[in-house]
Image (spheres, rainbow, N blue to C red):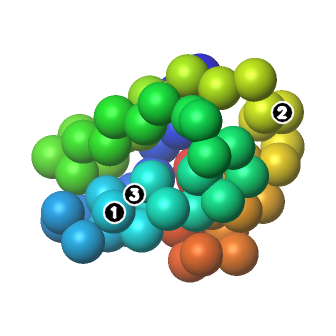
Amino acid sequence: MQFHIESMTCGGCARGVTKAIQSVDPAAEVQADPATHTVDVTTTAPRERLAAALTDAGFAPA
């Protein structure tokens, strides 16, 4: 699944996004690209739980 996160603008943000996603699913594969503000996630976790974790971390998906 893919998320668009406008507030992800640097490597530090990408690490924060990855950490938030992996707090829900430690085995999730995350590819965050600050240049395009996109995150591709391979996981079995529900999209809603990931979106909630991202929002809680300050990276609300658009």
Identity of the residue furthest to the front in this view: 27
Kindly indicate the quadrant of the structure image that contains residue 44.
top right
Q: CA distance from mark 2 to mark 1?
A: 21 Å
Residue type at numbered disc 3: Glu
Cβ atoms under marks 2 and 3 closer than 8 Å: no
CA neighbours of label 3 inside 10 A, class few (<14), some (14 to 19), many (20+) = some
Residue tagged 2? 46
Which one is closest to the eye, mark 2 or mark 3? 2
Q: CA distance from mark 2 to mark 3?
A: 21 Å
* Helix, strand or loop for disc 1: helix
Q: CA distance from mark 3 to mark 1?
A: 15 Å
The vertical placement of 29 against 7, above or below, is above
CA neighbours of label 1 inside 10 A, class few (<14), some (14 to 19), many (20+) = some
Residue tagged 3? 6
Residue tagged 1? 15
Circle number at residue 34 = none
* Helix, strand or loop for disc 3: loop
Residue at 65% over, 26% down: 43
